Amino acid sequence: MNVMSLISSKIVAWLLPAILPYEMAFAQPETIYMSVRSSSQTRLNASDNPTIGLFLSRDAGATWEHKGWRDQIKVFYAEAGVDGTLWSACGNGVLRSTDGGATWKITTGWEVTEVLKVKVDPRDPDVVYAATAYGIFKTSDKGKSWQAKNKGLDNTFVSDIVIDRTNSARLLAATEGGIYISTHKGESWAPAALRGKGVRTIVQDPLRAKRFWAGTEDDGVFLSNKKGERWQPANNNASLTTVYAIAIDPQNSNLIYLGTHEGGVYRSIDGGKSWQQRSDGMKNTVVHALAILPSNPQIIFAGTINGGLYRSADGGVMWGFNSQPDGQVWGLSIK
């Protein structure tokens, strides 16, 4: 090998680690899923009602594409499995798409309604859990059949489910009567904490697997460093009451965002020791959904009720309207 060839090979070897992530990002762009339940612009018997349902963006929110039926008016949340199957939590059940949202099939019967969240087992895409106003339902065959999994639940209004990423047999459920834990894939549940409190959301820290956060109705935010088995309030004198959504920076566990009722977005840069309101630019401060773009955590999305979707490109310092005027954005997820 001559000198020039040797130099060229060293340059390529040096540049390759930096180039590959960008090539991978362009080859496999992140998909943002936005669930728009309804809109205050809807008019009876009108042909020009705004389109609602599920929307996808593959360019960090620059453009959005509608997926699903135009009259799919009660969409709460959507999530994609590792096999590419797309699941949607709707008022009329759980819907599944195997072609990127072009066509949909309802997989549940009449007994499964008011589905608020769907969560796919990251290790087995055939296993999906549905959190509903009437309890928890589970499929182990990709939606061919569903079974109620409510043994041990004293309150069956379930707002959210978290699958422990270190052990997919371990689940946490956010209910109207506190937090419940299952250690064997939902076959039975036991009360864990916050008895009598309406828990709206639970989130596992992306870097510290033993750490969980919970948002509640009227009681603010709680923190667990014990795998969700023991909790402590983490409001720290902030005027936090109802917390609907929690998002944690995937690269920095100390950077946390809360979506609140009429308080907009709160941010902590010190792991929840203190909170600051970060809602500049928002005309609607009832925030039901939050999502952080993994490839660029400075970009954050906030879904509001009757105010549409907002986007921040500077870590929540300033917000600008992004999409869906007057829409109820109930769910945001990124895959």
Image: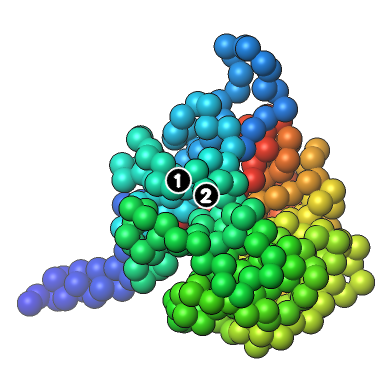
User: Which quarter of the rendered picture does the N terminus lie within?
Assistant: bottom left
Q: Residue furthest left?
A: 1
Towards the viewer: 223 or 124: 124
Reading the image, the residue beneath label 1 is 109
The number of numbered discs placed on residues in the rendered structure image is 2
- Residue 29: x and y, percent? 39, 51
**Residue 260 appears left or right of 322:** right
The answer, for residue 90, to whether it is visible in the render is no
Asked if marks 1 and 2 touch (Cβ < 8 Å), the reply is yes
Towards the viewer: 18 or 177: 177
Reading the image, the residue beneath label 2 is 112
| Residue located at (34% from left, 68% from top) | 124
Residue 174 vs 312, above or below: the answer is: below
- Residue 290: x and y, percent? 64, 54
- Residue 258: x and y, percent? 73, 61
Give neighbour class at mark 2: few <14, some 14-19, many 20+ (Cα, 10 Å): many
| Residue located at (80% from left, 38% from top) | 283
Towards the viewer: 58 or 305: 305
